[in-house]
Amino acid sequence: MDLIFTTPGTYLSVKDEMILVTVGENKTKVSPAKVDRLILTSDGVITTAVINLCTENNIDIIILDKYGNPSGRFWHCRFGSLTTIRRKQLEYSEIEKGFEIAKGWIVQKISNQIEFCEEISKNRTLLHEDITPKLDSIRNNLENLKNLECNSETKIGNIIGLEGNSSRMYFEILNLCLSERFKFNGRSRQPAEDPFNAFLNYAYGVLYSEVEKGCIIAGLDPYIGFLHTDNYNKKSLVFDIIENFRIDADTIVFHLFTKKLVNSSMYDELKAGYSLNKEGKKLFFDERSKYYEKIVRYGNKNIARSGIIQAFCHKFANELLN
């Protein structure tokens, strides 16, 4: 399970080989054997004893900023990456094989978007006239992407162009399905220009952290990618792999709004935009936990959604080795 702390002033220490959580007068002990990740989303105190206990038990410690992006992490120093995997990543990033990998991941992303739009439009017959041409445009982009030949570095720009156009249409469709109160004018990042993007940015931030962890555990180098640029200190592979899983964040946030679970007490209006507050973060993590607990079919077996990213990273690492 994830231990998620959103209350300012939370104090984490160790007692009897257990994580002791102190919030005001309330104290709770948690066994490290039950914890997968410890996530801090607000100001608090964590002792070095907790850090040591977590590293000994392979518990990922993540500190998120107000937008949900990981600003700091702790994990054990037994980094399991194999030299062969890194060499293959570097090799593929320079040849057509890397293009094929990047193309396949964006094909999956756009396919996910099409499937989601088809699902949410089923019971919105009054919107079909507006949704249909946008959805047709996304389908056309997908076919053009599939037909791209893997023979030139310049083709990466074509992938990005088709993906960008599809995403614009996709978010226009999502916007059509929201109530007037929460409609938005396209994607906006940090800070978000509206509550919907504030929730979505936070969801993506948490997802980045999950993908990065999956890469580390599988032995992949997060900084060697195939689609996004490999500038200094940019986790290109994380940005690449996350494209396969953005639909999970989209689904969670979209349903929060269409189920009318979001209200103005869950976000703060800043001078330049919006950000989630404690109540909004709690709502998001509660809904996220329910979503990832569900058992789904992945590959040839049934697993919880929470394990799919790690399974994906291990599978990709094995493909590189083979």
Image: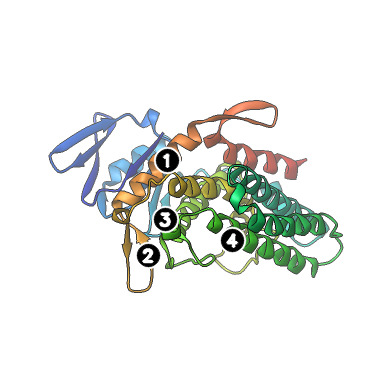
The CA distance from mark 2 to mark 4 is: 20 Å
Q: Is residue 283 left or right of residue 121?
A: left
What SS does tag 4 mark?
Answer: helix
Q: Is residue 128 left or right of residue 270?
A: right
Q: Quadrant of residue 271?
A: bottom left
Q: Is residue 140 left or right of residue 231?
A: right
Q: Give the residue at x 47% y 49%.
A: 253
Task: Name the residue that disc number 1 marks.
Answer: 287
Task: Name the residue that disc number 2 marks.
Answer: 274
Residue 316, compared with residue 92, is above or below; it is above
Callout 4 crowding tier (Cα within 10 Å): few <14, some 14–19, many ≥20:
many
Q: Nearer the viewer, residue 133 or 4?
A: 133
Task: Name the residue that disc number 3 marks.
Answer: 68
In this orientation, does residue 40 appear?
no
What SS does tag 3 mark?
Answer: loop
Q: Are marks 2 and 3 in contact (CB under 8 Å)?
A: no
Mark 1 vs 4, N-terminal side: 4
Mark 4 vs 3, N-terminal side: 3
